[in-house]
Amino acid sequence: MYDLERIIIIGGGPTGLAAAIRLAQNNKLSPIIYELRNPGTASLGGSLGIPANGVRVLHRLGLWDSILPRSVDIAKNVVHSTSGSVLNEVDVASEAKNQTGFGYIRINRVDLVQCLRDATQEYDIPIHYDKQIQSIDDLGDSVTVTFTDGTSDTGSLLLGCDGIHSSVRRIHVDAEIAPEYSGISAISSIVDDVTNRDPRDTTSLHSTLTPHGMLATAPCAANQIFWFFSKEVPLPQGSGSVDVRDGWMLHRQNELADCRNSLSNVLDCVQGKWGKYLRQLVDASQDVHFYPHYRIPLGGRWFVSSDNPQGSPRVLLLGDAAHAVQPHAGQGVAMALEDVILLSGLLVQYQDGDHASLQGVFDRFDQIRRPRIQRINEVAMRNGRMRRNQSPWAVWCKEWYMWTMLRINRFWGMSMSGVLNGDVLYDVEKELKQVKPTELN
């Protein structure tokens, strides 16, 4: 059965743009994008890390040639002690490249979004900005969205790609699920590099664990450096456990000042050339941003069945709108890109008559994605706990552990890249190939 043509996409960030491109090129559908913010907000988000599983999807979308000159290929993560010595050097790319052909890249969000926007123009995909949702009406055989400016649109399918604070989720899919605060926030900036470093260092991440949080740097294109300091920060007073963005807006300047003070104290304790370099980066920063890290609780709905008994659900959440995790697993963009590839593949099966309805497509999407999302969420939460306040003694013990493991692994010739768990080797298209015809409904 095939009744798809016009696809309404809410959200013009990486998820929505990638979904539009894939559905146009692979499913021959007609997507249209509606975005709340104006185009200038693409500069939000700083620098992004995309591991091999996400880079492979960008390649399949035909974006690799445009992404490559705007990104940095990362080879390793160098872990420093507060004394300035190197505790560990973790290869983050070799194993993935050997097995998939793709490694780990860093790219500024503004550049990623621009590459995706350029690709939408190639497929004549329209994007409408300053569009705020007022209501969604799922009719079972079509879906209508109405905006606060009085305009509306009707399509065969509506994809909620509007991020962690999704209006599609709040208005139509699952109003009871709200973002929850992770307890960790960060300040960050992108600055011009302040010193002439060893050329080999331009492909390395660097980090230091301190009693008051984690300091880290990542290279960007055009000889720039992204640095961040993530630490434990309490919710603004009176905001409770829910996501009150207004509360953060009221307290943002105070929290930013507090993080700056904490960072200054931390920098006083980081010694050696590494500590001096960090101080230079921070002092050179003109535009510093504060960002609290939220996540979506597990177990929420990603779609709802149609009220029409003869109809199918016509609204589906993708990316952060469905399953945002805190950023400490480095998989946010990659997870959204995997969603796009999987949905496109399942819709091809639907177009070929392998699924009797969109209910079957959405059910299968849910079954495949939830175990992986849960796994990445656990990794992100575990890594996030490393940023919480801890005693200098605890930091010292962890530094000695990392120093010891480095030498043990060097002696035995073992890898500490972390990719053996399969997170970055994962290929979502293999899930489609493993589906047997009898499993399709």
Image (cartoon, grey):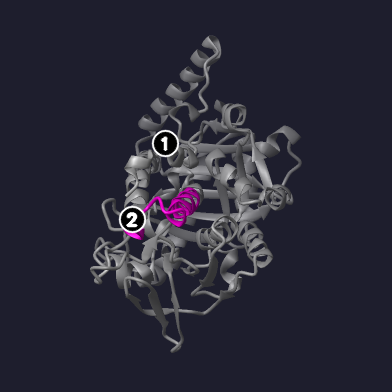
Give the residues drawn in magenta, as a range: 338-359
Q: Is residue 160 left or right of residue 37?
A: left
Residue 122 visible at all: yes
Q: Is residue 298 above or below residue 74?
A: below
| Residue at figure coordinates x 66%, y 40% from the top left | 73
Q: Nearer the viewer, residue 2 or 152?
A: 2
- Residue 244 appears left or right of 194: left
Residue at 51% x, 24% y is 416
Q: Give the amino acid type for the residue marked by disc 2 in the picture.
A: Ile
Q: Distance between the Cα atoms at labels 2 and 1?
A: 29 Å
Q: Is residue 131 magenta?
A: no
Mark 2 or 1 closer to N-term? 2
Q: Is residue 207 above or below residue 150?
A: above
Q: Position of residue 292 (x, y in %)?
A: 41, 58
Question: Between tags 2 and 1, which lies in front?
Answer: 1
Nearer to me, 274 or 421 = 421
Instruction: Report if residue 374 is visible in the image.
Output: no
Describe the element under mark 1 as helix, strand or loop.
Answer: loop
Reading the image, the residue beneath label 1 is 434
Q: Which part of the image, by quadrant, shows the N terminus?
A: bottom left
Q: Would you say the magenta stretch is mainly helix, strand or loop?
A: helix
Label 2, on which residue?
296
Q: Position of residue 123 (x, y in %)?
A: 65, 65
